[in-house]
Image (cartoon, grey):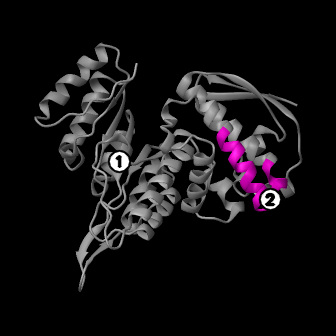
Amino acid sequence: MKKTISFSVPTASLLKELPVLAEKGVTEFAVHDKAVAGNAALLHEIIRCVAEHCPNMFISLPVDVRLVTRQLVSAAADIYCSLEITLLGTEKQGDRDAVLLFDKKLYAGKAALLNEAGLVFGFTMGWGQQAGDTFKHFRDRLDFAITLYPNHIDFPQFELREPSPKPTGIYSSKDMDFSCGMAFACRSFYSAGRAVPWFATVLKPLKITPSSFFADFDEWQQCNNCSYITGFEPDEVPHRELERMQLHFLKEKYEEKHKEQLFTAVSDMVRLNGAFSRVVAEGEECELETSYRPDDLLSPYAADIAKFCDTTCLEQSSVKVFAGKDGVDYISRN
């Protein structure tokens, strides 16, 4: 059972409701209250409450990036959770217009703490909502965010929690449309498509930025009637269908870049990781055929697809992916 509830102050309501919801069988819970994000004491209290009263509940918590400390990370590691961090710049008044500054060092350092601990986290970001924002700034933020390996990137404009931004002298209506399409492509391909384990690896041979890749995928979605314009909802589509879309588009991109010889490894990697994700998310076990051994595909050597294909022998394998005692496991037969 999935249920998303937004709480406002008084915060005592939230702490009282969590155990009650757990008793009613709610297994996933999301908090969207911005007051929670900036309150370190409350965040720790919520984490303590979940650990004590509903240890099997998965909870999404908004967190101000400055509050991501080793202490918070250590506490969050004891529960099932996702920390949701908003990517924001700092507005500074220039000689004539506002300038938007973005602290990459701050976000990179906090993401490193989260990745080191193996915590699930996501980013929330928008476009044209802050004074001084531009289309280039949005693309730069998106490209930078992907390098930090978030589990997902959310765009509140699609969830109607934020008003649509209005065009400005430095962020035209056309650029707003491009941003919307790019964001939706990211939501479809990266977030709903569960691409975080392999996205950077697969993108490297194409030698394009994430934002350019998403811009191309947005065009592909519009041509195939599965864009935001047609009301396509990636979160409501079975993951296997999204995976087919990913592979179809990736095949086109690898052919366009004359990297067809690498696509077999790309396909194996995408399908194997997809099977792992479905065991976790849907409890769906499966068998699949790969052209490379799964041990090789999951090794650090596969991070460089070109070198991997040059140095690794093709070896047809039948792989069974299933839920093991300590998590997702697999057995392969050659």
From this viewpoint, which residue is outermost toward the left?
Answer: 10
* Observer able to see residue 273: no
- Image quarter in which the N terminus is found: top left
Q: Which residues are magenta?
A: 245-263
- At label 1, counting other C-alpha atoms closer than 10 Å, the crowd grade (few under 14, some 14-19, many 20 or more) is some
Could you give the CA–CA distance between mark 2 and mark 1, rounded to whole angstroms? 36 Å
From the top left corner, tell me how far across and down residue 208 is, in percent: 63, 65
Q: Nearer the viewer, residue 249 or 113?
A: 249
Total number of numbered discs in the rendering: 2
From the top left corner, tell me how far across and down residue 69 is, in percent: 32, 53
* Observer able to see residue 150: yes
Q: Nearer the viewer, residue 215 or 47?
A: 215
Tell me the tag on residue 157: 1
Q: Depth-wise, is mark 2 or mark 1 nearer the camera?
A: 1
Amino acid type at image mark 2:
Lys
- At label 2, counting other C-alpha atoms closer than 10 Å, the crowd grade (few under 14, some 14-19, many 20 or more) is some
- Image quarter in which the C terminus is found: top right
The residue labelled by disc 2 is 259
Mark 2 or 1 closer to N-term?
Answer: 1
- Residue located at (30% from left, 13% from top): 24
- Residue located at (78% from left, 47% from top): 265
